[in-house]
Image: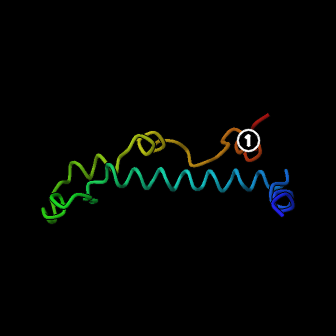
C-alpha cells in the first residue's frame, strides 16, 4: 500500500509543484517570523501588551522602510527592461 502511494504522489512531474509550494510556505514563514520578532505593533509578552498603544513612529518607520523597499524604490517596475526596450523602441537598431 505504501509503495503504490509513493509511486502515485512522488512522480517527477510533481517536483515543480512541490518546489513552488515549498517556496510559498518559506515566504509565509519568513514573513511570520519577521512580524513576530521585529514588528513594533506586535507585543508577545504580557508586560509589553499592558503598555497599550505606543507612539513609536521612529520604530514603525524603520520597520516599514526595510532594505528591500529602499533598494527597489528608484528602479523601473519591469522584470526585463532590456528586452522590453528592444521590442518597444522603434529607433533601436
Looking at the image, the residue that sits furthest to the top is 93
Label 1 environment density (alpha carbons within 10 Å; few <14, some 14–19, many ≥20)? few
What quarter of the picture does the N terminus occupy? bottom right
Locate residue 10: give its quadrant: bottom right
Q: Residue furthest left?
A: 51
Colour theme: rainbow
- Give the quarter of the figure containing the C terminus: top right
Q: Residue 4, relative to residue 26: is it above or below?
A: below
* Residue at horizontal 76 percent and vertical 51 percent from the top: 16
Tell me residue 57's x, y (percent): 20, 53
Q: In the image, is 93 to the left or to the right of 50?
A: right
Q: Position of residue 37 (x, y in %)?
A: 33, 49
Q: Total label count?
A: 1
Picture coordinates of residue 3 (x, y %)? 85, 57
User: Of residues 89 and 2, which is closer to you in this image?
Assistant: 2
- Whole-percent x, y for residue 67 in the image: 41, 40
Residue at x 81%, y 60% (from the top left corner): 2
Q: Which residue is mark 1?
A: 83
Taking the spot 45% from the left edge, 53% from the top edge, the residue there is 31
Nearer to me, 20 or 11:
11
At 66% across and 56% down in the image, what residue appears? 21
Q: Which structural element holds mark 1? A: helix
Q: Name the foreground residue: 26 vs 3.
A: 3
- In the depicted structure, whether residue 64 falls above or below residue 46: above
Amino acid at each position: 500500500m505504501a509503495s503504490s502511494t509513493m509511486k502515485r504522489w512522488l512522480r517527477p512531474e510533481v517536483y515543480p509543484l512541490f518546489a513552488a509550494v515549498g517556496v510559498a510556505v518559506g515566504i509565509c514563514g519568513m514573513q511570520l517570523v519577521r512580524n513576530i520578532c521585529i514588528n513594533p505593533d506586535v507585543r508577545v509578552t504580557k508586560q509589553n501588551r499592558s503598555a497599550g498603544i505606543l507612539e513609536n513612529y521612529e520604530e514603525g518607520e524603520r520597520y516599514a522602510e526595510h532594505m528591500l523597499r529602499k533598494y527597489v524604490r528608484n528602479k523601473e517596475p519591469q522584470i526585463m527592461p532590456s528586452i522590453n526596450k528592444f521590442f518597444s523602441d522603434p529607433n533601436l537598431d
